[in-house]
Image (cartoon, rainbow, N blue to C red):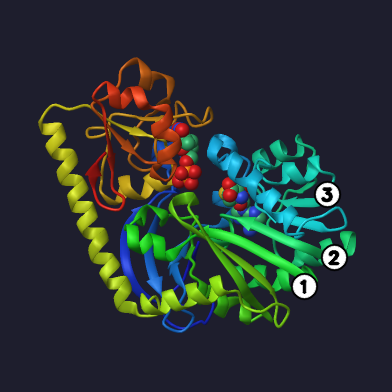
C-alpha cells in the first residue's frame, strides 16, 4: 500500500477531510476461518486545493482488490443490464460506434456492455484484471486482455490492433490510483477524432446526498468536471460534453477528446458553472460534508439502537461494497443487524468485511421478513422496491441513510 500525503495529480500536500478509521476491503467478504487474517487500512479522505481532486490518502494495492476472487458482478442488477444495452444503442445512433470502428472497454467485468458489441460484430476489446469476471466476458464471445489498463499496455494494443475510436469505462476510472498513467495511455491510444467516455459516481451527488458510503478502498477518487478537466488537460485532452445519469446513486459521464476537436456542449458548460456555484473548489464545502457525515452516523446509530431496544428485528438488504464503509465507520455488528440478504451466489455464506455480519441467501428474506431492512443498495431502490412489495405490505419498513437517515 502506498502511504500518500501528496496529491496524485499535482503533488501538492493533501488537506485531510475525514478519517474513517481502519477499514477492510469494500468487497472483502470472507469466511469465518479467515477473520484473523483480515486486511485493514486507514481510510482518510483528502482534498487538493490545486488539482481540486478529492481522493483517499491511502489505497490498498490493486492486486489485493482486483483478482481472480473479485466479488462484484455487473449483471446482478437487471436495471444495469438494460442501462448498458440502452447506452450501447445510444452510442450506435450517435455513430460513436459502428462497424468500421474499434472500441475498447476498461474494466469490462462480466461483459454487461461489450457483449452487445460482440453480438453486433463490432471490433472490440475488453481490459479486465479480475480473472473470474474476465472469463465470464470471454465466454460471451468478447476478446479480453486479463490485465490492468496502463500506458505500457496501450503501446502493445497500438502495435497489435492500431488506434482506437472509442475508449469506454464505467465505474472503474475512479478505482485506479495511477490515473495519470491511464489518461496518458488513453491519449496515445485514441485516434485523432477518437473519444474517451467514462462515468463514475459524481462528487456533487455524494455531497448533496451525504452518501459517504461511496467512499471505500476501490474509489480512490471522487470526480467532478472541474477535477477531471484539470487532469485530462495535462495530456492534451479536454471534456467537450457531459451527462448526468442516475446510476450508482448519481453519476457523471464525461466525453473527452483531443483538444480543439469539438466545441464544449451547453450541458458541459452548465455543469462547470454549477460546480463553481456550489463551491466544489473550496475546501470549506468538504468540511461541511464532514459535519453532515458525522450527523448521519449519529442518527443511524441512534435509530438502530432505539429499534433494537424496542425488540425489533433488523436485517440488511444487499451486501454491497458501499455497506462496508457504513458498517465499519458506525461500528454496526450482528448484534444490531442480524444478517444481510443478497442475490450473489459467491457472497452467500460469507461474512461482511470487518464487522462479520453473515451474508444470507435472499430467498430466506421471504421466509421470515424482518421488521426493518437496511437498504444498502439504496441506488437500486426502484428495482428492489418493485420486487419486494410484499415486504412492505406485510408491515416491513426500509431504513435508508440517503439523503438523511429515515424510514421508507
Ligand atoms: N464496468 C462495470 C464494472 C465496474 S467494477 C460496471 O460499471 O458495472 C470495476 C471493474 O474494473 C472490475 O471488474 C475491476 O476488476 C476492473 N478494474 C479495476 N482496475 C482496473 C484497471 N486498472 N484496468 C482495467 N480494469 C480495472
Ligand atoms: P451495488 O449497489 O451495485 O453494489 P456496490 O456498492 O458493491 O457497487 O449492488 C450490488 C449488490 O447488491 C450485489 O451484492 C447484489 C446485491 N443486490 C441484491 O442482493 N438484490 C438486488 O435486487 C440488487 C439490485 C442487488
Quadrant for residue 228, please give it: bottom right
What residue would you read off at disc 1? 188
Q: How many marks?
A: 3
Question: How packed is label 3: few (under 14 Cα within 10 Å), some, or many (20 or more)?
Answer: some
Q: Earlier in the sequence, mark 1 or mark 2?
A: 2
Q: Is residue 128 visible?
A: no
- Horizontal relation, residue 176 to residue 387: left or right: right
Q: Which SS class for mark 3?
A: loop
What residue would you read off at disc 2? 158
> Which residue is drawn at the image coordinates 15% and 39% (left, top)?
305
Q: Is residue 63 visible?
A: yes
Q: Which SS class for mark 1?
A: helix
C-alpha distance separating marks 3 and 2: 18 Å
The correct choice, above or below, for 370 with respect to 298 in the image is above
Q: Earlier in the sequence, mark 3 or mark 1?
A: 3
Point out which mark residue 122 bears.
3
Q: Position of residue 1 (x, y in %)?
A: 50, 61
- Horizontal relation, residue 93 to residue 376: left or right: right
Q: Position of residue 281 (x, y in %)?
A: 40, 79
Amino acid at each position: 500500500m502506498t502511504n500518500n500525503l501528496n496529491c496524485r495529480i499535482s503533488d501538492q500536500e493533501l488537506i485531510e477531510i475525514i478519517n474513517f478509521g481502519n477499514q477492510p476491503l469494500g468487497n472483502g467478504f470472507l469466511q469465518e476461518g479467515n477473520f484473523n487474517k483480515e486486511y485493514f487500512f486507514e481510510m482518510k479522505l483528502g482534498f487538493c486545493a490545486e488539482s481540486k481532486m478529492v481522493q483517499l490518502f491511502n489505497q490498498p494495492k490493486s492486486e489485493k482488490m482486483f483478482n481472480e476472487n473479485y466479488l462484484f458482478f455487473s449483471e446482478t442488477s437487471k436495471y444495469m443490464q438494460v442501462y448498458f444495452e440502452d447506452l450501447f444503442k445510444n452510442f450506435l445512433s450517435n455513430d460513436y460506434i459502428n462497424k468500421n470502428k474499434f472500441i475498447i472497454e476498461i474494466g469490462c467485468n462480466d461483459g454487461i456492455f461489450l457483449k452487445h458489441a460482440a453480438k453486433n460484430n463490432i471490433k472490440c476489446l475488453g481490459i479486465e484484471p479480475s480473472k473470474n469476471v474476465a472469463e465470464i466476458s470471454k465466454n460471451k464471445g468478447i476478446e479480453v486482455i486479463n490485465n490492468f489498463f496502463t500506458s505500457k499496455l496501450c503501446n502493445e494494443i497500438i502495435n497489435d490492433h492500431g488506434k482506437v475510436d472509442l475508449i469506454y469505462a464505467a465505474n472503474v476510472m475512479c478505482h485506479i490510483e495511477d490515473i495519470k498513467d491511464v489518461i496518458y495511455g488513453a491519449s496515445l491510444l485514441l485516434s485523432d477524432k477518437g473519444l474517451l467516455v467514462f462515468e463514475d459516481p459524481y462528487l456533487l451527488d455524494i455531497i448533496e446526498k451525504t452518501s459517504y458510503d461511496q467512499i471505500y478502498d476501490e474509489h480512490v477518487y471522487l470526480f467532478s468536471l472541474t477535477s477531471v478537466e484539470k487532469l485530462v488537460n495535462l495530456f492534451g485532452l479536454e471534456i467537450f460534453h457531459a451527462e448526468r445519469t442516475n446510476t450508482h446513486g448519481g453519476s457523471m459521464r464525461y466525453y473527452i477528446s483531443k483538444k480543439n476537436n469539438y466545441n464544449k456542449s451547453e450541458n458541459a458548460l452548465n455543469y462547470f458553472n454549477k460546480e463553481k456555484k456550489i463551491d466544489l473548489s473550496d475546501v470549506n464545502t468538504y468540511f461541511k460534508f464532514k459535519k453532515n457525515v458525522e450527523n448521519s452516523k449519529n442518527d443511524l446509530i441512534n435509530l438502530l439502537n432505539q429499534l433494537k431496544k424496542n425488540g425489533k428485528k433488523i436485517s440488511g438488504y444487499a451486501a454491497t461494497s458501499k455497506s462496508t464503509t457504513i458498517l465499519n465507520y458506525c461500528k454496526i455488528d450482528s448484534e444490531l443487524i442480524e444478517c444481510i440478504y443478497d442475490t450473489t451466489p459467491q457472497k452467500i455464506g460469507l461474512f461482511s468485511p470487518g464487522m462479520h455480519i453473515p451474508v444470507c441467501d435472499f430467498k430466506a428474506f421471504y421466509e421470515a421478513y424482518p421488521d426493518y431492512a437496511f437498504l444498502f443498495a439504496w441506488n437500486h431502490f426502484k428495482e428492489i422496491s418493485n420486487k419486494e412489495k410484499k415486504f412492505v405490505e406485510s408491515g416491513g419498513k426500509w431504513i435508508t441513510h440517503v439523503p438523511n437517515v429515515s424510514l421508507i
